[in-house]
Amino acid sequence: MRAIVGEIEHTGGVRRERDGRLVRDARRADLPAIVDIYNSAIASRSATADVEPWHADRREGWFADHLPNRRPLWVAVDLMGDVEGWLSFQDFSGGNGYSATAEVRVYVHPRRRRSGVGAQLLDLAVDPTTGLNLRTLLAFVFTTNAPGLALFTARGFEQWGLLRGAATFDDGDIDVSVMGRHIARGATDP
Ligand SMILES: CC(C)(COP(=O)(O)OP(=O)(O)OC[C@H]1O[C@@H](n2cnc3c(N)ncnc32)[C@H](O)[C@@H]1OP(=O)(O)O)[C@@H](O)C(=O)NCCC(=O)NCCS
């Protein structure tokens, strides 16, 4: 497994790794690239339950819902500033008791896969110093999505549940793995 995590700087909501690509909060100008990456996942029919393509001008509300200090939307950008991938946080469920639990989704541009983008985004998501006050991360991954399951497993997630036939398509149902991982509270808490 690659050693990805370096020292991460926090600069007014912008987060970055020192060596290599930048991970930062998404900006409105990133939305078309974010949507393009997501649409390639929709087209693959293997990584999301969405079947209709997204349009950037209809995702303004979704974008605005991602508050940088609570449920952010991060992008990984290369040295040219091109978006290579993104990771979103969203509430798992209502109720204060769930406030420290979030669902994460991660999508990487098809041409940038297997180069550590997803791992870098997830490593930051599980970093207890991000200030998001999260204790538990969940991801819902199709059991047919080998790269997705491999990524989350490689970053310390385990299968905590199985939602049988939860994703329904014209050509059949797909089981969904509930992948979960705790975030350390401190240096001595695994
Ligand atoms: C899943 C996905 C995000 C992985 O992103 P990525 O940037 O290609 O992953 P990385 O290069 O960081 O890989 C990290 C580790 O994940 C595992 N992994 C990732 N892709 C894999 C694949 N195709 N086959 C096997 N293992 C894989 C490996 O353990 C890898 O470590 P290694 O390269 O040292 O062997 C990417 O394939 C993608 O965008 N898929 C469509 C969206 C999706 O399925 N998201 C998950 C559900 S939200």
Image (tube, grey):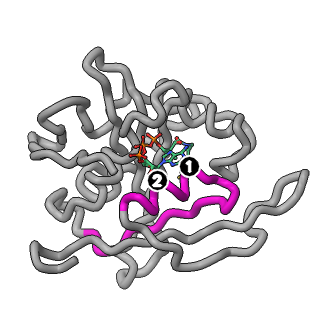
69 with respect to 9 (left or right): right
Instruction: Give the distance between the C-alpha atoms of the residues marked 1 and 2, in whole angstroms.
Output: 6 Å
Q: Is mark 1 within 8 Å of ligand 1?
A: yes
Tag shown at residue 147: 1
Contact check, label 1 and label 2, Cβ < 8 Å:
yes
Residue 28: x and y, percent?
A: 37, 29
Three-letter code for the amino acid on which mark 2 is drawn = Leu
Highlighted magenta segment, given as a residue range: 134-155
CB of mark 2 near ligand 1 (< 8 Å) = yes
The image shows residue 173 at horizontal and vertical percentages of: 82, 62
Residue at the location (56% across, 27% down)?
36
Q: Nearer the viewer, residue 57 or 133?
A: 133
Q: Within the magenta stretch, is there residue 71? A: no
Q: Quadrant of the C terminus?
A: bottom left
- The residue that disc 2 covers is 151
Residue drawn at x 23%, y 32% as measured from the top left: 22
Identify which residue, 131 or 82, lies in the foreground.
82
* Residue 93 locus on image (x, y percent): 49, 73
Q: Nearer the viewer, residue 129 or 99?
A: 129
Q: What SS does tag 2 mark?
A: helix
Residue 115 horizontal side relative to residue 107, left or right:
left
Furthest-front residue in this view? 1
Q: Residues within 10 Å of mark 1 (few under 14, many from 20)?
A: some
The 10 Å Cα crowd at callout 2, few under 14, some 14 to 19, many 20 or more, is: some
- Residue drawn at (65%, 59%) of the image: 142
**Horizontally, is 11 left or right of 1 in the view?**
left
